[in-house]
Amino acid sequence: MLSSLRSLPSRLKSTLSPPASFASSPPALSLPLSVSGNPSKAAGLLCLSSAAIVTGIVSVGGLTRLTKSGLSMTYWKPAQILPPQTLEEWTEEFDAYKAFPEFEQRRSMSLEEFKSIYYWEWGHRIMGRVAGMWYGVGLVGLFATGRVPKGYAPRLLGLFSLGGAQGAVGWWMVKSGLGDDRRGDRKEIRVTPYRLAAHLTTAFVTYAGLVWTGLELLCPEGERRRAAELVRGKIEALSSPGARAQALQKLARFRSLALLSTALTAVTVTSGAFVAGNDAGNAYNDWPYMNGRLVPWEDMIDTSGTDGPAYLNVFENTAFVQFDHRILAYATSAAIASTAAYGAHARGALEKLGLRVLSPQVTNGLRAMCALAVCQVSLGISTLVLYVPVHLAASHQLGSLALLTSGVFLTSSMRYIGMAVRRDVGKGERGVVGGAIKKSAQ
């Protein structure tokens, strides 16, 4: 684990003035994830461990969808823990499934085949309850022992509520595939893409909230503010107003690009939910073309297959949904590449000024995001051209969670930079970038 922040002031003071020679680089800023004696540590670890369980839930949920198992449990009983135990119970469960529209397309299914899809859905639901129990019991423990960090009670309770609501959203999604209005469907019966997108997006929001809060609690606000003030002190100690303005500008732009990359990742993940909901990955299985065309306009603007206004094609038209996902993936990849390129440029420019203020967390977070982006793009293309094999499709969904995690980690690690380039470190005044630029112009 990284060294303690206690030695941070002395390391930073040693680099307040530009070095006489650039033969050796100035010492790096280090921000440990956990501060010794941190009273918020228990709450932070609870959030991160719960996020790990959510990762498993998302993974199993993806496999449940890919194995077409999501409609096997035709009821919602939150108190149920065990699956059917006897042949009689299994027969009763199978008979209940036969009463719903999906079985009309699976009349040759045997009891053993039904068991295999049932276990996927049952496992997905049980993991959700395990996550709720783990976080809920842990939260009660924090309240009982007075270890809820000051000001965090509403957020921690909100995350619990969001996780609890996820079960209701999941059942709301499943119900869209069980109604009698689905009888006679020629296409394979599946849940509506809107509800699937709501279910997956809620899971990702809950996960991101847990990770962000966990990281925030393990590196308390006071420590980040102290680091930000020390960085600002280094910058303000530069003799040239122009150098100060340049340093602040580089840091501000680097942080903005990181935020953009993370935001685009989140939007791309949401669009992927509509690809899954429309089963759009099983069409246009060539790349970089779509059935031999870069943009299949005639397929994308066709309104004959959509009930309702033409704009619904964005969410329901297979060609449009897949095209959206591709474009967003390209935009996200370009943003991440731009962040990496500008980060390298900013690091070099800052070191020429005698500043080495990018922490190892920032550097490692950016490296992880770049590597995961390459893996995720490769997985996406492979999944598409190989006609969505289950193992690749599941890996692609899990990869999107990993990529989002790297973005959340990166932006969380850069919070001290945001504080450093604003005059409101503890005061709420306007940013120093504009002030420094004005000074440099005088």
Image (cartoon, rainbow, N blue to C red):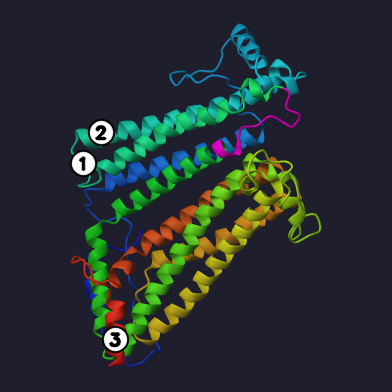
**Quadrant of the rendering where the N terminus is positioned:** bottom left
Distance between mark 3 and mark 2 Cα atoms: 53 Å
Mark 3: secondary structure: helix
Q: Which amino acid does label 2 sit on?
A: Gly
Q: Whole-Å distance between the Cαs marked 1 and 3?
A: 46 Å
Disc with the residue nearer the chain's start (3 vs 2): 2
Whole-percent x, y for residue 161 in the image? 36, 35
The residue that mark 3 highlights is: 438
For this rendering, which residue is in front, 153 or 195?
Answer: 195
Lateral position of residue 362 relative to residue 371, left or right:
left
Q: Quadrant of residue 251?
A: bottom left
The mark found on residue 141 in the picture is 2
* Residue identifier under label 1: 147
Give coordinates of residue 223: x percent, y percent: 24, 62
Q: Can residue 15 be seen in this view?
A: no
Residue in the foreground of this view, choosing between 158 and 349 = 158
Give the residue type that dot 3 points to. Answer: Lys
- Tell me the distance, in whole angstroms, between the alpha carbons under discs 2 and 1: 8 Å
Q: How crowded is mark 2: few (under 14 residues within 10 Å), some or many (20 or more)?
A: some
Q: Does the magenta stretch include residue 174?
A: no
In this rendering, the label closer to the viewer, 3 or 2: 3
Q: Which residue does the image show at 65% across and 36% down from the upper left?
A: 66
Task: Give the left or right position of residue 367, taking residue 178 as reference.
Answer: left
Q: Dot 2: what SS?
A: helix
